Image (cartoon, rainbow, N blue to C red):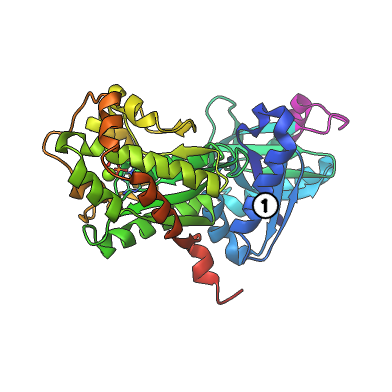
Amino acid sequence: MNRVILIKYGELTTKKGNRKLFVDTLYSNILKKLKNLNVNIFKDMSRMYIEYDSLDEVEILKRIGEIFGIHSYMIAYKTESNLDSIKKTISEVLESTFDLTKKYTFKVETKRSDKNFINNSMECNNIFGSHILKNYENLSVNVHSYDILVHVEIRKEYSYIYLNEYKGLGGYPVGVLGHGLLMLSGGIDSPVAGYLALKRGIKLDLVYFEAIPHTSLEARNKVIELAKKLAVYGFNMKLIIVPFTKLQEEIYKNVPGNYSITIMRRMMYRIMEKLTKRFKGLAIINGESVGQVASQTLTSMNVINSVTNLPIIRPVACFDKLEIIDISKKINTYDISILPYEDCCTVFVPKHPIINPNLEHCLEMEKSFDYEALISEIMQNLNIIEITDSKEDEYSDIL
Ligand code: ATP
Ligand code: MG
């Protein structure tokens, strides 16, 4: 039997105008994800088909499950588009999958994209159902409650028979919605925010504000490990490490303690704006969640946000912490995020950060030191690490 992996697209179908871009992007993402495996991938506007080496089947299925833009995928058996070939393949699939000396109920579901096919879907269901009943005395039809669902897809060139579907990740293929910069700290929220932005089709580069020696190299390594987990879904990304120490020290020297976090975050956004322009992004993404800490009240957000006109996307803005934790466990970032290394925000955190800061006060305080010079210096001393999907590393010597 000729096995292929059949891929059904996700939300692409709702975006008729952009369909070609979506399909092409998904195609190139699948190629990237499977690039060191022996596969042939064929695409049309509603399906993709992957021919593969059966030894790689488990690995391919796992990787397909990590790609956004896929509604579902399945191992399908390819055959000629005529009734006899389809019947023969149905028999082979049933016989190789089930112990047909036992009793089962079944249902046949036919989809016919080739509207010129001689029989309609209902007729096909009857024809294939009768074929099964005639050949296997232990199988009986029950369309409401069945043990076996036989899917038949009749397409112009070939037809496909399959039993089980795997649920894909959904969302849009990474890259179709352009490019943004994610503020990635070592916490729980920002990797989840990154995952959700990738799911909306945004290609990411990552920014980490570092304050050595107040923060450790372990803290940086933790962020690198988180970045690698995101690369499973986001492919290659730059991790831009911002040397934040001097600016942060100046803030704590010149700004009253209760305003230090507010001013620090205004500085972060100023730097993010410059980085977004330099790296040709269209938006800033971060893990802020309304009400979680003093800098995330609506008043604080207004005062902090006012330094930039770029869109700031906060995918977890309205999530409960527990909802965020659930996702972080699913994407394997949680165990890394809870490692105890200090972040540049936590090192300097004041006892009583203001929850209703005043913009005029901020502007006044920012006059007390030359932050623009410090930001220019920072922009000349960025450290950039290329992050890749770790599978590429694992296999790099084979390539
Ligand atoms: P997280 O769990 O992601 O660290 P948090 O609850 O600790 O979030 P904050 O520390 O207030 O929240 O930061 C809010 C957001 O600002 C973070 O989710 C992240 O996007 C960004 N951020 C904070 N610190 C840094 C940093 N050192 N480098 C890059 N981004 C940061
Ligand atoms: Mg944090």
109 or 137, nearer to the observer: 109
The segment highlighted magenta reads: 112-128
Residue 394 in view, yes or no: yes
The residue located at (54%, 60%) in the rendering is 59
- List x then y, in percent, for residue 357: 24, 26
232 or 278, nearer to the observer: 278
List the residue tagged with mark 1: 28
235 relative to 226 in the view: left or right: right
The quarter of the displayed image where residue 245 is located: bottom left
Q: Is residue 394 above or below residue 58?
A: below
- List x then y, in percent, for residue 137: 63, 40
Q: Is residue 157 above or below residue 50?
A: above
Callout count: 1
278 or 324, nearer to the observer: 278
- List x then y, in percent, for residue 129: 70, 33
189 or 158, nearer to the observer: 189
The quarter of the displayed image where residue 150 is located: top right
Mark 1 residue element: helix
Magenta highlight on residue 137: no
The residue located at (65%, 44%) in the rendering is 7
Quadrant where the image shows the C terminus: bottom right
The residue located at (29%, 22%) in the rendering is 299
Q: Is residue 299 above or below residue 336?
A: above
Residue 91 in view, yes or no: no
Q: Specify the farthest residue to the bottom.
A: 397
Instruction: Please state which amino acid type lies under the numbered disc 1.
Output: Ser
- List x then y, in percent, for residue 145: 52, 28
369 relative to 201 in the view: left or right: left
Q: Quadrant of ligand 2?
A: top left
